[in-house]
Amino acid sequence: MNPEPSAAQRSVAAAITLLAERPESAPSTCTPDLAAPPWSFDPVPGYGPGASLADAVPGSMPRQGELPQEYRDATDAELEQRITAAKRELGSRAVILGHFYQRDEVVRHADFVGDSFQLARAARERPEAEAIIFCGVHFMAETADMLSGPEQAVLLPNLAAGCSMADMADADSVEECWEQLRRVYGDMPDAGGLLPVIPVTYMNSSAALKAFCGRNGGIVCTSSNAAAVLEWAFERGRRVLFFPDQHLGRNTAKAMGIGLDAMPLWNPRLPLGGNTPEVLERAKVLLWNGFCSVHKRFTVEQIARARAEYPGVRVIVHPECPMPVVDAADESGSTDYIQKAIAAAEPGSVFAVGTEINMVNRLAAQYPQHRIFCLDPVICPCSTMYRIHPGYLAWVLEGLVRGETLNRISVDGAVARDALTALERMLAVRP
């Protein structure tokens, strides 16, 4: 009889299932609904169980249709076999891209695994593939569609895999913000040729917002190149409008020496974002009132507990975490930075990591020479990433085998043209 896998070896999905069967086991999950398969809550408006459970959902959020019964009834082993067989039959005609935050049962089938910046590049570098199956979330699939060839199809296995942070900044609200800023700042360059404000959107945003930046002299950034992008923007403008994640913007600008008093928060529900014209005049970075529900869960108290339990622990957090958490950590960086830091560490290192649980759990399994644990003791994955299930992956792959293109993501041509301008600027900026 094989011994039960350790917590580090067990996938997050398997751990959640075990907790549902044995609720007395530690640790806990943020909601017991995580044990249910995603098709059980796909018909219900919302992000589904996980970190974004309480976030407001826009009416425009895509809905996933019913998954055929054969995929819902299939066992994990059967889905594994069907995915492997479909991949073999499709060969180079299809490529699977997987984000670091995907569940193990999906990411093991990916041809390339990375963060949003790396996956954006990977989409462009697979011209031989007729189909790109994007195991991530909606804004990532949109970006892949824009960066891939016109003859390539980008498929999102579950259309309900959106992003609550991305949804916190919509095109209408950003346009209204822009008009208000123009009334305060004007729209003419100063004597040095600097524009009043440059828009910068995080990769975690819709194609429409990337297009807004492209039309207005702006750019896209990722957590890997945010500092380089802000430097690019300040070479062209006196101020930056940064959306939708306030924390990445604040942490990046603070590290560049910009004071907090020059970083007002913009609340799109209030006139002038809740600021006075005087505050806006002093601003260097205007921060949109958005956040990641996963990274918002990390706290300074969690870091203190980790240090008390493991003296000498190395605390690394994602820059989407609130500023006090980033300040209390030893270092912060993108998911790629976190992975490389752990890979390069001396054996026997202890890491407390502040990012999504699927990635932390996978790192713990990949690097058994270290002790690696998530700062948050509660298993609470990204709600929308978690909606990509092996059943949906098998469904879209077998559809391709039959000649069907399911769940294709297509960006309108005019939107794509402007968004590509901002994306090309991003790709030209090296972190």
Image (cartoon, helix red, strand yellow):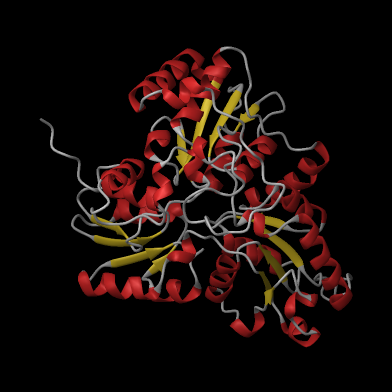
Instruction: Answer left or right for 187 relative to 24.
Output: right
Instruction: Answer left or right for 230 relative to 1.
Output: right
- The outermost residue toward the bottom is 278
Q: Is residue 310 above or below residue 406?
A: below
Instruction: Answer left or right for 52 relative to 287.
Output: left
* Residue 380 placement (x, y as % from top left): 41, 54
Instruction: Answer left or right for 22 relative to 339.
Output: left
Give the quadrant of residue 186.
bottom right
Q: Nearer the viewer, residue 391 or 17?
A: 17
Residue at x 52%, y 27% (from the top left corner): 95
Residue at x 67%, y 58% (from the top left corner): 201
Give the quadrant of residue 239.
bottom right
Residue at x 79%, y 43% (from the top left corner): 415
Q: Nearer the viewer, residue 427 or 383?
A: 383
Give the quadrant of residue 373.
bottom left
* Residue 157 placement (x, y as % from top left): 55, 32
* Residue 369 placement (x, y as % from top left): 19, 50
**Would you say residue 318 is visible in this rendering?**
yes
* Residue 241 placement (x, y as % from top left): 72, 68
**Would you say residue 311 is visible in this rendering?**
no
Q: Is residue 298 above or below residue 397?
A: below
Q: Nearer the viewer, residue 243 or 294?
A: 294
Residue at x 50%, y 74% (from the top left corner): 323
> Which quadrant of the rendered structure holds the N terminus?
top left
Q: Is residue 217 above or below residue 262?
A: above
- Tag count in the figure? 0
Q: Is residue 248 above or below residue 204?
A: below
> Which quadrant of the rendered structure holds the C terminus?
bottom right
